[in-house]
Image (cartoon, helix red, strand yellow):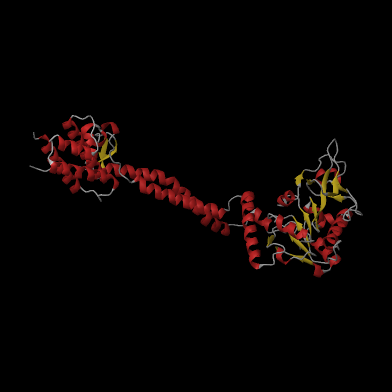
Amino acid sequence: MSRQVRTPQVGLEVGLKIPLKVALKVALVELVAVAAPVLVGLVGVVGSTVLLPRAAQAAPPSASQVRSQLPSPFNPEGQDWEGLSQLVKMARSELGPAHVTLESTLSMHDLKREDGLLLVHPERPLDADALESFMRAGGRVIVLDDYGTGDELLAHFGMRRISLPTHGPESLRGNPSFAIAQPASVHPIVRDIAPVVTNHATGLEQHGLSPLLVVHGGNGEPDVLLSVAGAVGQGRLIVIGDSSISMNTMLRYPGNRALSNAVLHYATDDDVWGKRGGTLHILVNDFRMTGSFGDDSRGMARLGEAERSARRWLRTLRHDGIPASVAYTTAIAICLWVIAWVSTRVGRTHKTVMPNFARPVPRAVQGGIAGHAAVLGSPTASRVLALMELKAALEEALATRLGLDRAPPHDELAAKLLATGVLDRGGAQSLSSLLGRLELAPMGRTGRVRDANVIAAASEVGELLKAARQP
């Protein structure tokens, strides 16, 4: 008789069974279906990070790349129309070459209270706390910014940007983008200057600071301040809402040249607390600020720099979003995790799961005598339960033998059984000793209860019940 070989069965769900080979094929199809989009995304990420940069290196420069190689706006050494070379030349001529520095990285720790800062169109978030500490000690800060990253510094001192009037009565060639700003006070910076020509500037809304320049509105529009000044401790803060006001082409206007000259002198002029004569640090566009003013301890300086770096990183993250390298790395990690997760689960065979209503009910939960016996005999149940069950059964049987509704204490029970002749003196003593040991079992005073102890106790109970039944 030939032996029949049966193909192993794998249950996908209740009531459905398919061959193992078919199940593996189905699992493979599911793996490909789920992992294919992930693999495509991974290839796209790798291609964008590896292949595209190489292709860009071999490709001819684009128009944006050509523009990036041209002189940048506000270049301190730029001779073109939007450079700042004439402003730098004016500063060196008026203050002396030794008192003017151009920097791309400024260490606040190296500043002196006599120094001044000229910040033009910052492109990185400014450390408002470090600048405030510098000014409170006596330093002076002049900010020329319209569309840069000076918003946080403005907010720190209660200012915010607003639009200039669009129907002002005074503008260059009737263009509101080149509005004319007039002096708004007798402050030393604007006391003797002519009207100033702006270039796509922004206004300032502030409370409690001194106005310097104002652009008048027309057709019911309110006047808007272009520049304000304020005292911060022993130092000074000047804010002008136009980065272009001092670039080469704008210095041909008398008011702009006079304002630029006044700003340069104001940055290093003597103050009421004494002579200054410090250095004017000119920082433009993508400059960096490190350290903190007044940190004499090297350890505290490093701690403060770490704190400020974390805050700058959070501000950059909020302003510019997640860096491309972090986004690509995170995408690759997620793709690999998805592939690993799918691979470990899609190849698993499904086991047949019997519904709850079709499963047999365990004896331990059935109730009645069978359930009670299953609980007492369970391998995980304490054997003390069995001893207590034997004690209760013995007391109930002997109380019934005496005609009592409830069993009295074991000494009294033994005495009554002896007095009525149900047990002799030896049996009464054995009963009293056995019941005493069984009462101590739940308290752990008899040591660990094992199966042998239960069997021995059951044998004694049987002997006593047998003696009690004899006439």
Find residue 79 and report its horizontal and vertical position in percent: 78, 61
| Up/down of 26 relative to 130, above or below | above
Find residue 433 and report its horizontal and vertical position in percent: 20, 45
Find residue 94 and report its horizontal and vertical position in percent: 86, 65
Q: Nearer the viewer, residue 471 or 365?
A: 471
Q: How many marks?
A: 0
Q: Is residue 143 visible?
A: yes
Q: Is residue 4 visible?
A: no
Q: Nearer the viewer, residue 182 or 367?
A: 367
| In-image side of 106 versus 174 (left or right) | left
Find residue 3 and report its horizontal and vertical position in percent: 11, 43
| Up/down of 92 relative to 414, above or below | below
Residue 467, by quadrant, is top left
At 56% across and 59% down in the image, what residue appears?
58
Residue 365, by quadrant, is top left
| Up/down of 216 relative to 91, above or below | above
| In-image side of 140 versus 340 (left or right) | right
| In-image side of 134 versus 197 (left or right) | left
Q: State the residue lying farthest toward the bottom.
A: 98
